Every structure is written in structure tokens, then in C-alpha cells.
């Protein structure tokens, strides 16, 4: 299976953002994952549209913007206009998922729906045929560097069974070359990794190691 590798910018050195982005682009990354947190949906605050727009100016990478916010409906447009290629939103948020999906479609971006580790897969099934991607969180969102929760893998298997081989299933949280094997075996084809990639001095080597999991 050919994998999409998406370094999560949350673990980068924000004082040297352009260099950090260039290092993963030159290292062979496919996408760049940007974690937006509002201090309400999760107990942390990261960055907003101006940072996405700045990153857009320094890279050609596909920008995958993960909205960990209570009100994706209100903010989808400004993130789309900042240069996001894909917006993903949490099914546990306060807006009606069908309305969020319709708004993102209107904006012309790819659409992802996200579910947290305690959320049963049944919560996203009504939307499965309406989105381009499902992100199955493998940590409780809010911070990088947490431990992978293997219980979530059965959700991936069910989504893969229902949507077939070409659908985008992303996993985010605690991904390294070891946990990536479990994720890929369950049916994941997009790997997000923060600490594993930005914590490594040779970004190309760790990206190759993650990609090799798909060939094993
Ligand atoms: C967690 C974020 C992740 C995070 C992953 O709330 O959604 O994208 O950056 O970081 P690692 O790979 O270090 O667990
Ligand atoms: Zn994320």
C-alpha cells in the first residue's frame, strides 16, 4: 500500500518554521498536518489562520488542517482562505456535522471527519459517504508526544471494510515506525507524526522508515 506521510507541525520549532517545513518537504513528506486548538474543545491553544497563511507561502505541500475547535462552521471559511487543502473537524464538536460538511464543500476543500479514542465508530457512520477522509485519533487530542492507544484500531478496520481500499483513513497520535505497523495493518493509509519526525535530526530517514511500513 502506498502511504501518505503527514508530519505534524505542532512538534516543530516555531521560531524556525520555514526551515522546519523545508526539512520535511525535502525529506519526502507528502502532506503537512496543522493542529488548530481553541482552548475550549481541547485544553490547549496553538495557532490560527495567519500561521496557516504564512506556511502556505513557503511550501507546496498539501496542507491538512486538523480543527480541534468547538465551532468549525464559524471558522472553516477563514482557514480555507488561508490556504488549507483539507479541513478536518471533530464529530464531538458543537456544530451539526452535515452543516459543517456542506460548508466545507462550498469552500472547495477536501473534507475530513475526526473521532476521538472514546468516541464509537457509530458516531461517524452517517457521514462516511459524505467525506473524503476519516481521522481516527490514537491519543486524546491536545498535545503532541503522547502514547499510542491500540484500542482504536478496530474502528479503522470497520471503516476500511465499509469504504473499500481507496478511501483515506488517517491516524494521528503516538505514531512511530512501530505503532505505524499496527495502524497500517488495520487499514490506515495516512500517517500523521509529530514527535517521531520533528524529534529526529534526519527527517528524510524517519520519513523513509515510516513509508517503509507500507511496503512491509
Ligand atoms: C494531538 C494532535 C497531533 C499531534 C501528534 O492532539 O492532533 O497531530 O501533533 O503528535 P505526536 O505524533 O507527537 O503524537
Ligand atoms: Zn492532529
Image (cartoon, rainbow, N blue to C red):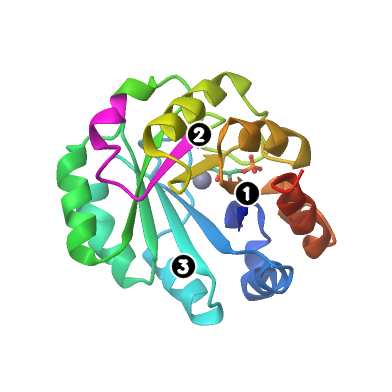
Mark 1 → mark 3, Cα distance in angstroms: 33 Å
* In this view, 196 is above or below 65: above
Q: Which comes sooner in the sequence, label 2 or label 3?
A: 3
Whether 129 is among the magenta residues is yes
User: Decide: marks 2, 1 in contact (CB < 8 A)?
Assistant: no
For label 2, count other residues whose C-alpha is less than 10 Å away and answer few (under 14), some (14-19) or many (20+). many
* In this view, 30 is above or below 44: below
Element type where label 1 sits in the image = loop
| Residue 88: image location, x then y, percent | 37, 49
| Residue 58: image location, x then y, percent | 55, 80
Q: For the residue with label 1, is its CB less than 8 Å from the closest atom of ligand 1?
A: no
Q: Which comes sooner in the sequence, label 1 or label 3?
A: 1
Residue 137: mark in rendering: 2
Element type where label 2 sits in the image = strand
User: Decide: marks 1, 3 in contact (CB < 8 A)?
Assistant: no
Q: Nearer the viewer, residue 45 or 18?
A: 18
| Residue 64: image location, x then y, percent | 46, 58
Whether 97 is among the magenta residues is no
Name the residue carrying label 3.
Answer: 51
Name the residue carrying label 1.
Answer: 1
Residue segment shown in magenta: 123-136
Q: For the residue with label 3, is its CB less than 8 Å from the closest atom of ligand 1?
A: no
For the C terminus, give its image quadrant.
top right
Q: Nearer the viewer, residue 130 or 54?
A: 130
The quadrant holding residue 18 is bottom right
Mark 2 → mark 1, Cα distance in angstroms: 21 Å
Amino acid at each position: 500500500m502506498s502511504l501518505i506521510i503527514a508530519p505534524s507541525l505542532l512538534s516543530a520549532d516555531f521560531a524556525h518554521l520555514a526551515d522546519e517545513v523545508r526539512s520535511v518537504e525535502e525529506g519526502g513528506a507528502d502532506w503537512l498536518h496543522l493542529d488548530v486548538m481553541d482552548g475550549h474543545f481541547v485544553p490547549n491553544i496553538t495557532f490560527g489562520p495567519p500561521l496557516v497563511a504564512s506556511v502556505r507561502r513557503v511550501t507546496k505541500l498539501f496542507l491538512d488542517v486538523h480543527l480541534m475547535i468547538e465551532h468549525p462552521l464559524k471558522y472553516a471559511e477563514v482557514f480555507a482562505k488561508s490556504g488549507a487543502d483539507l479541513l478536518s473537524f471533530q464529530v464531538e464538536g458543537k456544530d451539526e456535522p452535515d452543516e459543517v460538511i456542506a460548508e466545507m464543500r462550498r469552500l472547495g476543500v477536501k473534507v475530513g471527519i475526526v473521532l476521538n479514542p472514546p468516541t464509537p465508530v457509530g458516531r461517524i457512520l452517517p457521514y462516511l459517504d459524505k467525506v473524503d477522509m476519516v481521522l481516527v485519533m490514537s491519543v486524546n487530542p491536545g498535545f503532541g508526544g503522547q502514547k499510542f492507544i491500540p484500542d482504536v484500531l478496530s474502528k479503522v478496520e470497520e471503516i476500511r471494510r465499509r469504504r473499500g481500499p481507496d478511501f483515506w483513513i488517517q491516524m494521528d497520535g503516538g505514531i512511530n515506525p512501530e505503532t505505524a505497523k499496527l495502524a497500517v495493518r488495520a487499514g490506515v493509509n495516512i500517517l500523521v507524526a509529530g514527535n517521531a519526525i520533528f524529534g529526529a535530526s534526519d527527517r528524510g530517514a524517519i520519513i523513509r522508515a515510516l513509508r517503509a511500513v507500507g511496503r512491509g
